[in-house]
Amino acid sequence: MRARGKKLAAFSLACKTGPLRRLMFMAGHPPASLLQSAPNNMELYQLRYFQAVASKGSYSAAARHAHVSQPSLSIQINRLEEELGRRVFKRTPKGVRLTPAGENVLETANLIFEQLRKLRHDLHESEPHQIIRMGVQPLLAATILPSILKDFLREHSRTHLAVLERPNYLLPELMVRNEVHFCLMTQLEHFSPQENVSPLLHCKYGVFSRDPQLLKKHRRWGFAQVVPEALLIFRDPNSLEERLRRMGMQMRRPANIVFSSDQALTVLEMCASGAGVAILPLLVKETASRLKLHCRQLDEKKLQTQIALVSRENKVMATATQQFISLLTGRLKKMAF
């Protein structure tokens, strides 16, 4: 704790005598002005908004990137300019451009955030037991994660893991609130431009049944072959149910969907009970085998689940987290479905 206190004190001093002091000098403020007004008035999020406008060249594009309204962003930029006593942007026919003072502010703001990233990294590294916090989609938590966690903890006994299982649409919010360092997910339309996305695996779908003779009815199983069956549907991707209904309309035979869920293992259990034929990602094949279910690959090239690792942009991660991600990505890229 004493070491951590020294780091925080050093960072506070650096902000007063280093980048923040330089930023205020550059804007024409004397040192006393910095010490009296900067801690109370200038906010880090204002500099974040400033960086976004400088990067995007547009207030509207920066507001979308920062997930705030354009009027709110404009107000904060105005307050930043009032605090610095200089205009940092000028409008041109081609968009917003930095003024000479703005260029200096950008350089110093980048230094400030770099110091913050280093501070967070140092604090993570100083923990006696490093904690890895991750979010994961339920299907991936049940099928991919267990063996990877077991292997990692065998080699990193001093590392603590905190895994939050949530639906895809809730995972990005965990990162926004800094509750997790990264997420393993499938439906990528839920992520924002502020996140880094690393695709790891594309998984095809299969037709699962308790009756092996039923799966021998067709040499090829596509949507046209499954429509007449009692169907148990996994709603990821969400377009699966719609595509089956559309095929049923073309065949003039409505798709017989008796059960649908966004929980793949629930669909698998319904299939094991004999309720119908399940359409699921081949990720569940091992679990299906334990339930004495049989499988045939669904021959629909455009139907697949993309698995990706999503992390915050410019997020500095502790060594243990980087090692876990390396193991996770390496293992997934070797899988084939």
Image: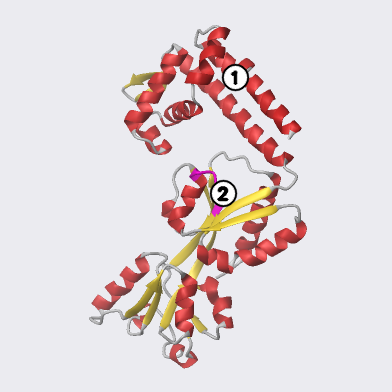
Residue sitting at 40 percent across and 84 percent down? 276
Lateral position of residue 194 relative to residue 330, left or right: left
Residue at numbered disc 2: 180
Task: Identify the residue shown where x is 42% and y is 52%.
Answer: 190
Q: Secondary structure at mark 1?
A: helix
CA–CA distance between discs 2 and 1? 29 Å
State the image coordinates of residue 314 (x, y, percent, origin top left): 56, 38
- Element marked by disc 2: loop
The residue type indicated by label 1 comes to: Pro
Asked if disc 2 and disc 1 are in contact, CB closer than 8 Å, the reply is no
Residue segment shown in magenta: 176-183
In the picture, measured across the screen, residue 45 lies left or right of residue 75, that is right
Residue at (45% x, 66% y) in the render: 304
Q: Is residue 129 above or below residue 22?
A: below
In percent of width and height, residue 124 lies at 68, 41
Position of the C terminus, as image quadrant, is bottom right
Is 41 situated above or below 233?
above
Counting from the top left corner in percent of width and height, residue 329 is at: 62, 57
Overall secondary structure of the magenta section: loop
Q: Amino acid at mark 2?
A: Val
Question: Does the magenta segment cover residue 84?
Answer: no
Colouring used for the render: secondary structure
Q: Does the magenta run of residues contain 178?
A: yes
Residue located beneath label 1 in the image: 19
- Residue 173, numbered circle: none
Instruction: Give residue 16's quadrant in the image.
Output: top right
Q: Assign the N terminus to one quadrant of the image.
A: top right
Pinpoint residue 212: horizontal percent, then vertical percent: 49, 90
Q: Residue at x 61, y 63 (%)?
A: 145
Q: Can residue 199 be seen in this snapshot? A: no
Q: How many marks?
A: 2
